[in-house]
Amino acid sequence: MITMADIIRDGHPTLRRVAAEVTMPPSQEDKEILKSLLEYVINSQDPELAEKYGLRGGVGLAAPQINVSKRMIAVHVKDENGKQYSYALFNPKIISHSVEKAYLTTGEGCLSVDEAIPGFVPRYARITLKAIDLDGKEVKLRLKGLPAIVFQHEIDHLNGVMFYDYINENDPFLPIENAIPVER
């Protein structure tokens, strides 16, 4: 089981590396790592388990955040209608996106970043991604709103990009032109 102690922090070189593709079919070890990423985000949202194991709440986790430089992410998040998106994915790739942008009104956070870094993070309002799930099946997801933002945040980790790289340094809360504000 992954705990906060396994999550590397901002400044660790692995967080800035481009992660390697996972060879298909995935090894048993890669499957176990991916399962444990999903287990963490699910458990971190359960107040009793989070307290018992000292887990910081999160909606997504990428393998580089536990110092495994491979293209694996897990997301467990609900959209504004309460629909649950719970995915553990190998080699996720955004294959198309909207021109329109979106951003979280509260800004973004990250399990690898201990301090709050205020500011708007521009993201694509809608994305389509392809990936391979734990059963080795290809998955194609069309996402918008909070799930789209979360998946982009996690995929950025696979490319060595941190959320605050997008924040306008001079004016962190500068309104993002023609962007949809997303409440969390």
Image (cartoon, helix red, strand yellow):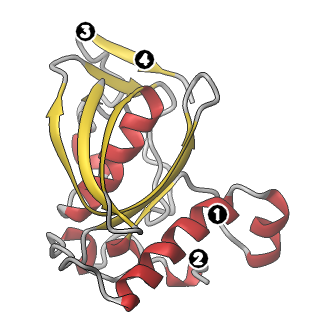
Disc 1 residue type (three-letter): Arg
Disc 4 residue type (three-letter): Pro
Residue 159, position as x, y percentages in the image:
17, 61
Tell me if mark 4 has few (under 14), some (14-19) or many (20+) residues whose alpha carbon lies within 10 angstroms of its own.
Answer: some
C-alpha distance separating marks 4 and 3: 10 Å
Residue 138, position as x, y percentages in the image:
27, 55
Q: Which residue is mark 4?
A: 181
Q: Is residue 181 left or right of residue 70?
A: right
Tell me if mark 3 has few (under 14), some (14-19) or many (20+) residues whose alpha carbon lies within 10 angstroms of its own.
Answer: few
Q: Is residue 139 left or right of residue 17?
A: right
C-alpha distance separating marks 3 and 2: 37 Å
Which residue is depicted at the point 41% across and 73% down? 9
C-alpha distance separating marks 1 and 2: 7 Å
Q: Disc 3 vs disc 1: Cβ atoms closer than 8 Å?
A: no
Q: Which residue is mark 2?
A: 4
Q: Earlier in the sequence, mark 3 or mark 1?
A: 1
Q: Which residue is mark 3?
A: 178
Disc 3 residue type (three-letter): Asn
Above or below 101: residue 18? below
Q: Earlier in the sequence, mark 1 or mark 2?
A: 2
Q: Disc 1 vs disc 2: Cβ atoms closer than 8 Å?
A: yes
C-alpha distance separating marks 4 and 2: 30 Å
Above or below 90: residue 120? above
Where, quadrant-wise, is the N terminus in this rendering? bottom right
- Residue 95: assigned label: none
Say what secondary structure mark 2 lies in: helix
Residue 174, position as x, y percentages in the image:
30, 20
Q: Earlier in the sequence, mark 4 or mark 2?
A: 2
- Residue 56: assigned label: 1
